[in-house]
Image: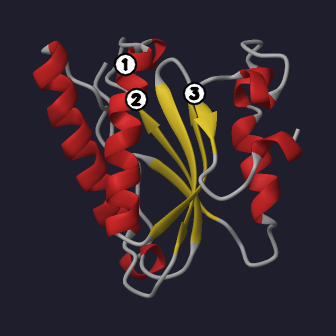
């Protein structure tokens, strides 16, 4: 079954100092994030591009076949669609070079956080995914998640 690209909101919604909850799925049928090496490779690319494209990484959580993120644009030029596209392109290229396998499914899913939504609630929700899936007892137990902004030991 072919996957369809998720629909996008008007382009302006993705530019500036907005906050987003994003989910990016691995290539159908693959489970690349069971590999610590893959997670490290992808996270290295992600952090480099996030800094270059003006995004703070409020939370990340690698599950077996997808990646959850909470991101915040740090200036008016931050462009989520461009950033995610480049991240998937760069990390996918490196992954293919290392493994000869595709990494990402086309597109990504996003939700723009409203002004009245607390960033910490979104962060806790993303970091709790492994707990809800029965893969960890607490958010600090899952080795493939974290935050570049918050100390997750105090979020559990």
Decide which of tag 3 and tag 2 comes sooner along the chain. 2
Q: CA distance from mark 3 to mark 1?
A: 11 Å
Task: Answer whether labels 2 and 1 touch (C-beta < 8 Å).
Answer: yes
Q: Locate the N terminus by quadrant.
A: top left
Residue 144 shows which numbered tag?
3
Badge 1: how crowded within 10 Å, few (<14), some, or many (20+)? Answer: few
What is the x, y in percent for residue 16?
A: 47, 82
Crowdedness near tag 2: few (<14), some (14–19) or many (≥20) residues, C-alpha within 10 Å:
few
Q: Nearer the viewer, residue 50 or 5?
A: 50
Depth order, front residue of 150/13: 150
According to the picture, the residue beneath numbered tag 1 turns out to be 37
**Residue 22, x across and y down, in percent:** 53, 50
Mark 3 or mark 1, earlier in chain:
1
| Residue 140 position (above or below residue 100) | below
Question: Residue drawn 87% across and 46% down?
Answer: 154
Asked whether 24 or 92 is in front, the reply is 92
* Residues packed near mark 3 inside 10 Å, few (<14), some (14 to 19) or many (20 plus): many
Please give the residue where the numbered disc 2 appears in the rendered image.
40
User: In front: 51, or 15?
Assistant: 51
Q: Quadrant of residue 82?
A: bottom left
Residue in view at x 44 percent, y 17 percent: 36
Q: CA distance from mark 3 to mark 2?
A: 9 Å
**Residue occupying image coordinates x 41% and y 51%:** 47
- In the rendered picture of this protein, how many numbered marks are placed on residues? 3
- Assign a secondary structure to mark 3: loop
Q: Does residue 133 lie above or below 129 as drawn?
A: above
Percent x, y for residue 125?
Answer: 77, 43
- Tell me the quadrant of the picture where the C terminus can be found: top right
| Circle 2: element type | helix
Instruction: Determine whether label 3 and label 2 are within 8 Å by CB.
Output: no
Q: Give the percent coordinates (x, y) of residue 72.
A: 56, 68
């Amino acid at each position: 079954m072919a996957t369809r690209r998720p629909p996008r909101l008007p382009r302006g919604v993705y530019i500036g100092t907005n906050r987003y909850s994003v989910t990016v799925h691995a290539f159908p049928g693959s489970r690349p994030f069971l590999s610590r090496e893959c997670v490290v490779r992808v996270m290295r690319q992600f952090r480099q591009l996030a800094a270059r494209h003006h995004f703070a990484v409020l939370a990340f959580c690698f599950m077996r076949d997808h990646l959850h993120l909470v991101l915040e644009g740090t200036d008016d030029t931050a462009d989520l669609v461009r950033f995610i596209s480049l991240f998937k392109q760069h990390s996918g290229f490196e992954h293919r070079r290392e493994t000869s396998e595709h990494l990402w499914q086309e597109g990504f899913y996003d939700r723009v956080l409203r002004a009245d939504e607390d960033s910490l609630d979104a962060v806790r929700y993303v970091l709790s995914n492994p707990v809800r899936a029965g893969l960890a007892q607490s958010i600090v137990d899952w080795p493939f998640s974290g935050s570049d902004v918050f100390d997750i030991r105090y979020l559990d």
